[in-house]
Amino acid sequence: MNEVEFKIERMILKLGNQLNYMRDIDLEQKNLTTVQSETMLYFGANEGTTASNLKDHLRITHQAARNIVERLKSKNYLYTTASENDGRANAVFLTEEGKKMYSSLKENGNRVGKALLAGFSKEEKEMLLQLIEKASVNME
């Protein structure tokens, strides 16, 4: 690894730690874990999908995905119904409380995103997005 690659990797880790810290403070007030937050954001954007879809999205076991869904059901943020596509699976939806929490999580993400990207032009933001997406594919 050359010096530039090492610096980039270290800066990405540092930035990730800073973002996680900011998110953890917000989530503590909401009584959610990071994974629960990601789950809420996933099902908010993909209502009607299943725990199996969540498993693939988060790269966790099916049992872990089901446990997260059950935990969020107990907090009255999610509910499930039999899937129309697969009778063995349950489709997952946000409750009214879940929709409020989803909106709050998105609002916080927008606030952090604005702080993170302050001073960036529209073109720089688009370029950064493309580079991050490319780096993410490289890590799969």
Image (spheres, rainbow, N blue to C red):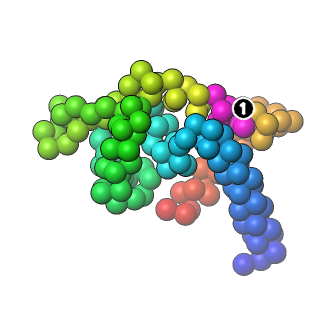
The residue under the point 22% across, 31% down is: 81
Give the residue type at disc 1: Arg
Residue 138, percent from left and from top: 56, 62
Residue 90, percent from left and from top: 23, 39
Helix, strand or loop under label 1 = helix
The residue under the point 41% across, 36% down is: 75
Q: Main secondary structure of the magenta part?
A: helix
Q: Is residue 30 above or below residue 52?
A: above
Mark 1, other Cα within 10 Å: few <14 / some 14–19 / many ≥20: few
The residue under the point 30% across, 56% down is: 62
Q: Is residue 100 above or below residue 3?
A: above
State the residue in front, 130 or 23: 23
**In magenta stretch: residue 125:** no
Reading the image, the residue beneath label 1 is 111
The answer to whether any part of residue 129 appears in the image is: no
Task: State which region is magenta.
Answer: 107-113
